[in-house]
Image (cartoon, rainbow, N blue to C red):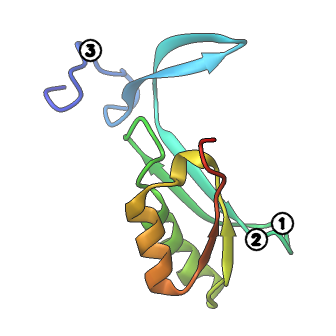
Amino acid sequence: MDYSGQVSLALNDHDARLMKVKDNGQKYPKFSFNIQLGTDTKSKLICGVNAVQNPTDHYQIPALMNQILVNLKLQPTKISADTIYSTLANLQYLEELGITALIPTKQ
């Protein structure tokens, strides 16, 4: 609670964090996790899942990609991701692995 600034905890999952979620166009706080999925475009199978307490996806590519690389047993040459993943840390990580990032800019 000190870390997140929350004033209460979820009764059934103490690790869940109070985050703003969107439902039917409305934003409200709810206890939840931030989940990322990595899928293979050819097989359409989920290759990696990452559940974190961070409220944004900005820096989640390294943890998700490490899991994907272990599960796929091969290294992809390209990945596609949402604009929110377009951070210097993510792009440098992918460049070090030799993976081309197909991420739209905010413009």
Image check: 38 left or right of 6? right
Residue 62 occupies which quadrant of the picture?
A: bottom left
- Residue hosting label 2: 40
In the image, what residue type sits under mark 3? Answer: Ser
Residue 90 in the image: x percent, y percent?
44, 64
- Where is 1 relative to 74, above or below? above
Q: Secondary structure at mark 2?
A: loop
Image check: 43 left or right of 15? right
Residue 95 in the image: x percent, y percent?
49, 79
Image check: 52 left or right of 77? left
10 Å crowding of disc 1: few (<14), some (14-19), many (20+): few
- Residue hosting label 3: 8
CA distance for labels 1 and 3: 39 Å
Residue 107 occupies which quadrant of the picture?
A: top right
Q: Contact (CB < 8 A) between labels 1 and 2?
A: yes
Residue 44: mark: 1
In the image, what residue type sits under mark 2? Answer: Asp
Q: Of the residues under marks 1 and 3, which one precedes in the sequence?
A: 3
Q: Secondary structure at mark 3?
A: loop
